[in-house]
Each structure stands twice: as structure tokens, then as C-alpha cells.
Image: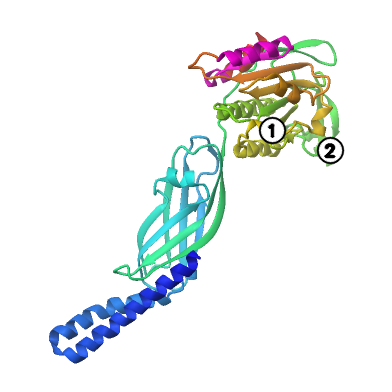
Amino acid sequence: MNKGKELLSMTGRFVFIVGLFFSVYVFAMFQGGKVSWTIFYMLTPFLLYSISLFAYPMNNIKAERIIRTKTIESGGKLAVTVKLERTFPFPLLYTVAIEKWADPAMVIKTKNRTKQIFLFGFKKNVEFSYEIDKLPRGEHIVEGVEVEVSDFFGWIQKRTFIELKDAILVYPNTTSIKYVPINAQYDRGSLVSPFSLVKDTTMATGVRDYQAGDRVTWIHWKSFARTQNLMTKEFEDRQSEDIIVLLDGRESDLFEEQVELAASIVEEAANHQANVAFASAGEETVAFPFIHSADQLHDVFVHLAKIRPVRTETVQPLVYSSLSTTAGSVVVVTANPDWTFIQSMTSLVNNTKSVICFVLVDGERALPSQLQEQIRFAKAKGITIHALSRRQFSEAFKEVAS
């Protein structure tokens, strides 16, 4: 419907310009005199340009977007360069290029910084750049570039939309978490370790065939030099215990803090070569059973960049077969530690050795009475509860060990 109205408007404007051209010519012919012909000759270039612009094919213009910022964290800056190219050098005057975003909130946030007005002229290539500060976490879709051109008086205005879709991922911020000793055991004897799930890479006990997902740093290069077969070092393992990080996907005023803490725990555990799994509860269960490589960790962060909170009544039971038989420690990240939800999140793990629940709170306010009651009830059920504000993230596991 809008395209039909736009075409009708353009046709009406074109008829007006052609009618004006013949009217001025007829007036000069019948009126005669220097003044009449001067008016005709003065208007002719403008009218002819408008008629030519009406016939100019806008699909001749192509666009390319270059995202200069490769990785963006929450609150970071996006830097983009847009290039416009065409094959037919028709003189374009007033040209407006606008990046079109799918989310109306992003349109408001950009504050016309993605809009560029310039003189195209006879050039075949032009480009413009823009920056957007303090991007919120999430997946932001830019759908394309709208290009609008106009004649001298705005009689003819033509626009085209160049589809050029890109997804801008803004990852959650992470905080460096300080690990402190938590009791763990090796297969032989006991030892206090910085984290109960860390594989001790200083104690190689043998070699085995290389398997997909093994770290490059674990490859036994001397064996490879002799046999030309990739071999992986085997290390002394601690107890067959895993850490499973469970993120509460329900709506909360502190949901961004929840995502940030979950991302920080997963990143630190993976960097310390822990056997870490991750799952989030929302409209559906999304789980990452084994995080043993940078690509798998990246997949988790992509999910954490895209995740959106859901209403409590739409949260589905947390069920995932590949996690249900895993024994180990469960870390629940939530802002609403009601027992029904905690029980549903931890019940998928059999033989759980410990359940730690990090409850996100506003450090500037006292704990609501309802939240205090929920914490007391969960503790009575044997759950280790620690209330954290954002500034306490780095000391999270110190609280666990104390």
C-alpha cells in the first residue's frame, strides 16, 4: 500500500514538472520578450534535471558495510563504515543515507548518528562512518541502508532500500573471579586446590591418541616428531566431579547482573581447564554439556549475548538428558531463590556433591523480607546461599570457601 501511494505521488510530481515545463515554454512563445525567455531558460536546467532524476534507476546503487569493531562487550562502542557504489555516474545532488535497525530502541539510541547527508555528484563511490556508544547487551539487527535523493527544489524525491542484514552481537561483561582453595582429591591422596575441577597440567602421567576437542597445549610434540601421529598428554585427574552453571532466565531487575556473573564463572572455569557445563532455564532449556575448546566457550557467550528474560509462568522445566547423569557441583545464578525453582534446577543432576546458589542483590538497598525468607528456607534445605552485588563478583568463591 505504501509503495503504491509513493508511486502515485511520484507520478503526480512528474506530471507537474512536465506540465510546468510546457507551460513556461508556451508562455514564452506567446508572450515573447526578453523577460519571458529569460525565465524559460533559467528554469529549463532545473526542470530537465528533475525529469532525468525521475528516470534514474536507484537500483544502480549498491552498499557494503564494514564493522570495524570486531568484539563488543556491554557498554562498548560500535564503529561502522558504510560504502555506497554505483556504475552509472549520474550527478546526484542531495543524498541521504540512513542505516535501518530492526529494534526501535536502537533507532532512538543512535540519535541520527547513522544518518548521513552528502553531495554524491559524479562520484561512483562514497563512504561514511559512524559510532554508537554504550551498546546494551544483546543481538542488534541492522537490516539495510535506505538511500534517498532529491532534486534542487524537492520536486522529485526518490528512495531505495538496499537490503544488507548484519547481526551485531554485544557480549556480557565479565569479571575476573579470584579462586580460593576448595577441598578436592586426586585419585591418589588429598590435596587442596584452587578449584575442585581443575585438571593438573603439571602432572602428566602418559600419552594417548589425540581426540577432537583436546587443547593444543596438551599435544605431546616429541611423540609427534617420532611417529608423525598426534598424541595427547594425560594428566593426573582430580575426582570425577564437574561444575554445572545454571542460569535463571526469569524476569528480574538484576537480570543483566545475573548474565554477567554466569559468564564470568564459565569463562574463569574454562580458562582454568575445569570440566564445566552450562544451562539456562527459560521458554526452553539451552544447555552446553562440555566446554573444552575456545569455540565451545564462544558458543556459550553467543547464547548469553542473545538471551532475554521471560515471564515466570512461561519458564519450562529444566530437563536435559546429557546433564542429568552428571555428578558434581551445581552453581545456580538467580535473583529469586524460591525453593520450587531451585529444586527444579538442581534435580536434573544426580549425585550432586554440593549446590551453591548465588543470589544477586542490589547493594544499595536492604534485602526485602520475602527474599530473606526465601534464603532462610533454601539454607534449611541444605543449599549454600550467597547474596552478591555486582561489586562483589570478584570475591564470589571466597565467600563459598569461608
Res. 200 in view: no
Q: Which residues are magenta?
A: 368-393
Magenta span main SS: helix
**In the rendering, at what x and y percent does residue 73 appear?**
53, 36
Q: Amino acid at mark 1?
A: Val
Above or below, 240 against 251 in this view is: above
Read off the residue under disc 2: 226
Q: Say few, some or many: other residues with alpha carbon within 10 Å of mark 2 (under 14 / 14 to 19 / 20 or more).
A: few
**In the rendering, at what x and y percent does residue 67 appear?**
51, 49
Q: Residue at x 57, y 19 (%)?
A: 394
Q: Residue at x 29, y 69 (%)?
A: 153
Residue furthest to the top in view is: 402
Read off the residue under disc 1: 315
Residue 382 drawn in magenta: yes
Above or below, 175 against 225 in this view is: above
Q: How is the image coloured?
A: rainbow
**Depth order, front residue of 243/279:** 279
Between marks 2 and 1 in the image, the one whose residue lies nearer the viewer: 1
Q: Secondary structure at mark 1?
A: loop
Residue 101 drawn in magenta: no
* 82 sits left or right of 384 in the view: left
